[in-house]
Each structure stands twice: as C-alpha cells, then as structure tokens.
Amino acid sequence: MANAPLNSEFNIRFFKPKKDQCKICTAYEQGSETIKHKIKQKYDSHINNNEVVRSLKDLNKDLAMNDKTVCVACFDLQKCLSPRSINLKKSRRTITEDLPKLLPIESKKLKGLLELCHNNDIPEIYHNFYFSLKSKESIGATNFEAEENTTDSDENFSDCE
C-alpha cells in the first residue's frame, strides 16, 4: 500500500525476490559485465558446490528410503540461524564525531541516575559514565557554585565509586 503512489506516479518498482537468494548469485545475475567477469570464478565454484550438495542430499534421501535403519533430516539453516552480527564500530564512531562531548542533563535527573547507581540498579561497569555526567545547572554556574553542586552530589554518593 505504501508503494502504490510510487508505482503509479513514478517509474519506480521494488524488487521482491520469489525465493531467498544468496549474495553471490544475486550479484552475478544483476551485475554488469565487468562485475560478472570479476566474480565468474567464485560464482562457478559456488554453483558447483551447490550441485555437489544437492546430489549428496539426494543420495542420502534415497538411502533413507531404501534402508529403514537410516534416518536423514534436512534443515534450512538460513531460517534457523540468528542474523549476522552487525559491525557497530562505524556507527559508534559517527556518533562520537557528531557529539564530541556529553550534553548536560537536568540536576534532578542526574541525582536520580546517581541514586540508581547507589542502589546498584545500574550495573557497576556504567557507574563511571554516570558520575562523569554534568548537570545543566553546574555548567551554567560559576566555578564556586559548580564546586558546591558537585560536592553535594559527591557527598551523597561517594561510596558508589
């Protein structure tokens, strides 16, 4: 339904494969001639490997049909396996570049977070992060007032560090 305006008003179509396709086959079938030439050997070995596996599967099925002592089970592991791990390193790096320093938060919210640290509701591994946070009031205040604000919170939660 969301694709209807794009399909009717613009010359844009969305490709929906009829079955699961691997990256090698899709790249070879949809690629240009130069891409096809580059991955031709990899594609051929991939197809040969598929044919060998299918023939072994057929042999095992025939063996199981003829010999009642043999049991063969075939699984589609692509549906069973968890998704591939995602490399989050790049996205984390992008976030730190966009936000080089921590933004200040409200003092009540900071006090609540530090209290959660004190009660061990937040795992200890994250305590240093929460203790390094600054409140909006301490950033906008003079140095003397900022020291007073930090000593108040440090007195209440000094045993958490």
Image (spheres, rainbow, N blue to C red):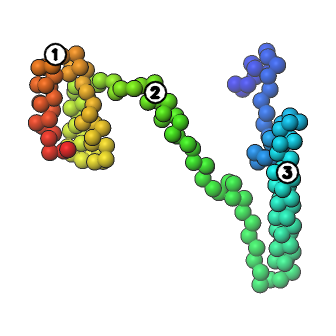
**Is residue 123 among the parts visible in the rendering?**
yes
Q: Quadrant of the N terminus?
A: top right
What is the C-alpha distance between the residues marked 1 and 2?
28 Å
Q: Are marks 2 and 3 in contact (CB under 8 Å)?
A: no
Choose between 66 and 11: the one closer to the eye.
11
Please tell me which of labels 3 and 1 falls first in the chain.
3
What is the C-alpha distance between the residues marked 3 and 1?
69 Å
Identity of the amino acid at label 1? Answer: Thr
Identity of the amino acid at label 2? Answer: Glu
Indicate the secondary structure of the residue bearing disc 2. Answer: helix
Please tell me which of labels 2 and 3 falls first in the chain.
3
Q: Where is mark 3, residue-wise?
A: 41
Tally of marks: 3
Instruction: Kindly indicate the quadrant of the structure image that contains residue 39.
Output: top right
Indicate the secondary structure of the residue bearing disc 3. Answer: helix
Choose between 94 and 71: the one closer to the eye.
94
Pinpoint residue 161: horizontal percent, then vertical percent: 20, 44
What is the C-alpha distance between the residues marked 2 and 3?
41 Å
Pinpoint residue 43: horizontal percent, then vertical percent: 84, 50
Question: Which residue sits at x=82%, y=73%?
Answer: 60
Quick check: 151 left or right of 65?
A: left
Pinpoint residue 49: horizontal percent, then vertical percent: 82, 60
Q: Where is mark 2, residue-wise?
A: 97
